Structure formats: C-alpha cells, structure tokens
Amino acid sequence: MTQTVLITGANRGIGLALVRRYLEAGDHVIATCRQPDEAIDLHEMPSANGVLEIMQLDVTNGASIAALAQKVKDMPIDILINNAGIVSGVVGFTNGREIDETQIFGQIDPKTWMQVLQTNTIGPVMLSQALMPSLLKSEIKKVVMVSSRMGSIADNMDPHYIAYSTSKTALNAATKYMGLLMQSDGFTVISINPGWVRTRMGSDAANLSPKESAARIYKVVDGLRPDQSGGFLNHTGEKIAW
C-alpha cells in the first residue's frame, strides 16, 4: 500500500537518505527543507517507484509551518518524520565532534540555547500540531521524532552539549505526552535514536552511513505497534532508557 510520508530536514544527511528509502518503497514523499532552490541533491533524487514533492519549511517559523499545513490540508499524511535539527545555535557550527563553547557550563549562551530548543523541540511539536487535520485523514497515523541517545538522562555521558542534549530530552518528554494524548485517535508517536551517523552533525568518525541509519529507521517505523506509542526507541528497535 502506498503511503504519504512527510520528512523534514530532507535536503541532506539522514533526511535525504529517508527520502530515498521511502521513494524506493514506492511511497509518496513530501520532502521539506528551508531553501528548496538550493537543495540540489534533493532535486536530482530519482523518484524510483514513488512520487516526490519538495516543499519549503522552516520549523522555527510559525508562518512557514502554517503555509505548509495549508498546502497539504486536503491530503492524508500517513507518516510524519520530524527529522530537522541542529547541534548548535551558533551560525556556521555544524560538526558535533567539535566543542561548542556556548554549551559548556560556566559559559552557556542563552540565545544559542534557545535557537537549539526552537529547532529541535518546539518546531517538531508545533509542526505536528499544525498537520493534525492531514494526519487525522490517515488510517496509519504515525508520528516520528528523530531524537538522540544524548537525550536520554540515564544513558547520556557527554557533558559538553547541554543545549543539544536538553533539547532532545525535552523532545522525548513531548513525545511521551503526545503519544498518550493521541493514542485514543489511533496514533503511534515515538522518538527514535538514529545512531551515530556520518553527517555534517555526526562527523566522518561516525559508525553508520545515512543509508544504513535510514534503512533501520524505516524498518522500525514500518513495524511500529500502537502499544509503543510514547516510547523512545533505538534504530535497532529496542527501548532506550529515559
């Protein structure tokens, strides 16, 4: 059965690999990014057996979210994958293997912290809320938040990324809340750790390629059960401690 899948942050890394994976499965993919005209890899993506639509979205901009919701209001969205995210609020900072000085306790910058929270936590929740009319039209009703193991209070052992880690912890808490709230309407809402992936954020030292991570995420999402709603899962499918 063909699904309609909306993926944010789809112009590179895990998002781009997810677009490719769902197109290969023959699905209708709505790929969003902040600057579609500059998303060369996305525009050159072969549609395989699926259908690709590219739309503009800035998850930190309420008007942009509203505009996207208006464009898709008449179509059912089966799966929403909130993938867009940043590791730092510092302009130009992309490499998660470097130390972001603004996230070290003792010299935390509140403005850059807020930018990370706005992108990684508030944006995905506001987008999910805005897309509810389309999500409710689906019989599949899956919402996926791409989180991080660094969002686990129990498992995170890296003290250097307070803004990023807390943004993913807050995202996980929102996932739990949404999962409980929306379950009665047939939704399955989860957070997923994509693994350490060779992207601009993850660096070349990471142990998974975007393709490998996307394939694992696809498998987990495809096999989701309603009783998993509100959970935090690894890319291999097992639960991660909060």
Image: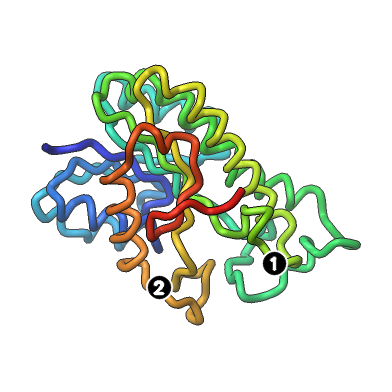
Q: For the point 69% across and 50% down, which residue is it?
A: 166
* Mark nearer the viewer, 2 or 1: 1
Q: Is mark 2 on a helix, strand or loop?
A: loop
> With 22 as the anchor, is 33 left or right in this view?
right
Horizontally, is 99 left or right of 48 in the view? right
Name the one closer to the observer, 128 or 189: 189
Q: What element carries label 1?
A: loop
Q: Which mark is residue 208?
A: 2
x then y, percent, for residue 59: 52, 39
| Three-letter amino acid code of the residue under disc 1 | Met
Residue 71 appears left or right of 22: right
- Please identify the quarter of the rendering in which residue 237 is found: bottom left
Q: Can residue 158 be seen in this view?
A: yes
Tag shown at residue 217: none
Q: Residue at x 31, y 37 (%)?
A: 79
Q: Is residue 16 above or below residue 184?
A: below
Where residue 144 sits, quadrant-wise, is top left
The mark nearer the N terminus, 2 or 1, is 1
Disc number placed over residue 157 in the picture, else none: 1
* Residue 200 shown left or right of residue 152 in the figure: left
Q: Using the image as rendered, state which of residue 176 and residue 55 is in the foreground.
A: 176
Quadrant of the image for the N terminus?
top left
In this view, the residue in front, 200 or 206, is 206
Cα–Cα span, label 2 and label 1: 20 Å
